[in-house]
Image (spheres, coloured by chain):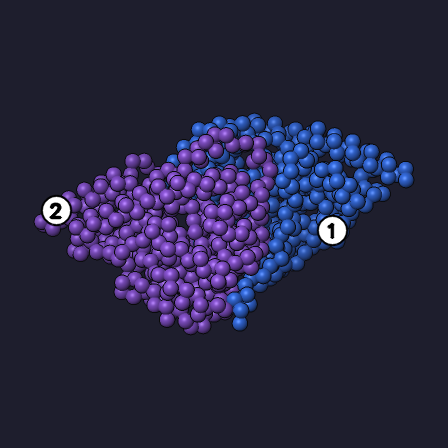
Chain colours: A blue, B purple
């Protein structure tokens, strides 16, 4: 027998490329094109470094209190983690613990099946319609739990609240997780439903709308019961997942709501303009309520465009996967970045069509 | 059926108290009494905050490269995580995946059985001798993996390298983890064995000797094969566990080896002096090679002393658990903090004995 026989072997999630070179146009991982709230710089300059010799507050109160106040919740209704990936992984481990399969869309965040495999959770993917919409009836059969993003990734499509409530209402015997990583770009959060459904967990992140993918902060909101179960598993995994510096920086960002509104507003305006530009260039796409557009060109294969863009140091995201292999996911950058993208695409498509 | 039926229910680990009030003498969680390396302050003052809008480097190279250089290893032999708790939790999930029980001492870090319960790993505790030593023969039966700290916690007792190698050599069909959280205070690391045993994982932390419990950084070192398996599971859990700020701060701390030697040297000197003081006060203890002393008083119950100290805002650690319920674990503070402890104990013990 070898020590390797009993190793848990997995096929890991592959994140979007993080090229180390500078001066690239990076529209491949849905990062925010604007810097974090200005208070963050000042906070770091004045930070009491000696405090780092002590363990952080295991309750992460400075941040959970701040989020609770922002969303008008009790601090016991908020859970924070190392990015929404950490929050979701803990939630899978905690709540998806039945012999029945959990349900999620066939086209969705590609980490869901990875977590299910890691924790040996049975799952069944439910096909989206041709225009990338969820069929609520697919989620009304016996299951071990439900998760989907809203707006969905990588499609950007938003489902309305009444459909979501319909699904949750039909599944009160399991935990339902709505992953709202992209909700701050004009989408409607289902947070208001957590007081009515104690089995509903809403997950959000600092990575997109709060301009701090590099800080790794995500959070979940739900009933006190749900949060307590999640806390217990987290405390059985690692008492202190959030370091002191991260808690302070995160709280500082939440406090600056004006800045948050300014940058999300700017991204929404750039997105709407980008939709027009892409349509003119011959792309088709479902309407996006996120900080990216998931688009397909009428004549040129997505893979070709992906590679042509990359050769120009313009990075977008491409998956060679069933049903989406002719799509590009283009994150919304600054107006200047988007213009550079459109200039290149205009030229490329014109030359290509003249051939 | 209720959604609660299939929740994973656990009894979480309870960390040592983190009182929020100032001006206490905190000798209860083995934190370093000295501040982090001076370069950390400067780094934070000059940090390029805009970098936080981007995802961190998923490979955490700035820190793994730095650690690899420090320990003369290949970067592929180093894994970093959110404190050694995160590293150990991932290692349990990755490597302890057999139907046979894993083995660890009955008196040891109290997170081991919590992780085993969380991940449903069978385990069997092996009793330490009366003087808190490991019997190597206990670890030579069929098992699913082996883990123990060296020096052990909360006893502070160090086992010598030949005994550890004997255990590893007898268990080449499973993964052996040596948890060296406390090795930098005069202990001998078994790092030199990783090139001979590809099933040996050595885990260390920034929380004690590097004065940054608040930063949450731990790391594992082992064969490339072992590290790759661990990476794969980590990438299936959360691609980016280490945030950009933490990676930069951690690397800065590793670079200042002179400071590291200075503070660990100081702690060792204070510990040796504290042993004399405690012996004079009527305490007995096994020799400690860590940054704490695990002591029992000849006449006064540990619980009473724990509470009397706490009433004076002097915090030490006490467990009401079999075999250790008459012991206090006293972290080594500054000389001034230790003196305040000894002054109080001298007075308390004298008054108590005069009664």
**Mark 1 residue element:** loop
Which residue: 34% across, 68% down?
Answer: B135
Residue at numbered disc 1: A320
Residue at numbered disc 2: B351
Report the front residue among B196 and A77: B196
Is any atom of residue B41 visible in this view? yes
The chain identifier of the residue carrying mark 2 reads B
As displayed, is residue A333 above or below residue B216? Answer: above
**Mark 2 residue element:** helix
Q: Which mark is residue A335?
A: none
As displayed, is residue A99 above or below residue B306? Answer: below
Nearer the camera: disc 2 or disc 1: 1
Residue A54 location (% of width, % of height): 38, 41
Image quadrant containing the N terminus of chain B: bottom right
Residue B308 location (% of width, % of height): 22, 46
* Drawn side of residue A167 relative to residue B241, left or right: right
Which residue: 42% across, 58% down?
Answer: B190
Report the front residue among B170 and B207: B170
Which residue: 61% across, 27% down?
Answer: A262
Which residue: 20% across, 50% down?
Answer: B276
* Drawn side of residue A219 relative to residue A129, left or right: left
The answer to which image quadrant residue A355 occupies is top right
Report the front residue among A219 and B309: B309
């Amino acid at each position: 027998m070898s020590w390797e026989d009993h190793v848990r072997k997995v096929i890991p999630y592959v994140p979007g490329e993080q090229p180390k070179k500078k001066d690239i146009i990076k529209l491949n991982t849905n990062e925010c094109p604007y810097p974090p709230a200005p208070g963050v710089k000042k906070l770091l300059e004045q930070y009491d470094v000696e405090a780092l010799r002590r363990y952080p507050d295991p309750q992460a109160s400075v941040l959970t209190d701040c989020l609770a106040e922002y969303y008008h919740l009790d601090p016991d209704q908020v859970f924070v983690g190392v990015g929404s990936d950490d929050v979701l992984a803990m939630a899978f481990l905690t709540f998806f613990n039945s012999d029945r399969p959990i349900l999620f869309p066939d086209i969705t965040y590609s980490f869901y099946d990875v977590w299910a495999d890691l924790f040996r959770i049975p799952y069944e993917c439910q096909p989206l319609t041709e225009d990338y919409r969820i069929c609520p009836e697919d989620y009304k059969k016996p299951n071990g739990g439900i998760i989907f993003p809203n707006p969905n990734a990588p499609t950007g499509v938003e489902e309305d609240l009444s459909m979501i409530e319909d699904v949750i209402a039909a599944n009160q015997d399991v935990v339902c997780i709505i992953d709202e990583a992209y909700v701050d770009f004009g989408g409607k959060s289902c947070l208001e439903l957590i007081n009515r459904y104690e089995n509903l967990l809403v997950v959000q992140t600092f990575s997109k709308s709060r301009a701090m993918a590099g800080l790794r902060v995500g959070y979940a909101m739900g009933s006190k019961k749900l949060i307590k179960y999640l806390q217990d598993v987290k405390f059985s995994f690692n008492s202190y997942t959030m370091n002191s510096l991260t808690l302070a920086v995160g709280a500082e960002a939440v406090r600056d709501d004006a800045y948050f509104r300014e940058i999300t507003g700017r991204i929404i305006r750039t997105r709407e303009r980008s939709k027009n530009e892409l349509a003119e260039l011959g792309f088709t796409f479902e309407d996006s309520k996120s900080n990216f557009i998931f688009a397909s060109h009428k004549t040129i294969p997505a893979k070709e465009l992906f590679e042509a863009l990359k050769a120009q140091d313009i990075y977008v995201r491409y998956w060679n996967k069933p049903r989406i292999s002719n799509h590009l996911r283009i994150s919304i950058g600054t107006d200047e970045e988007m213009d550079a993208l459109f200039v290149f695409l205009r030229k490329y498509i014109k030359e290509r069509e003249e051939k």
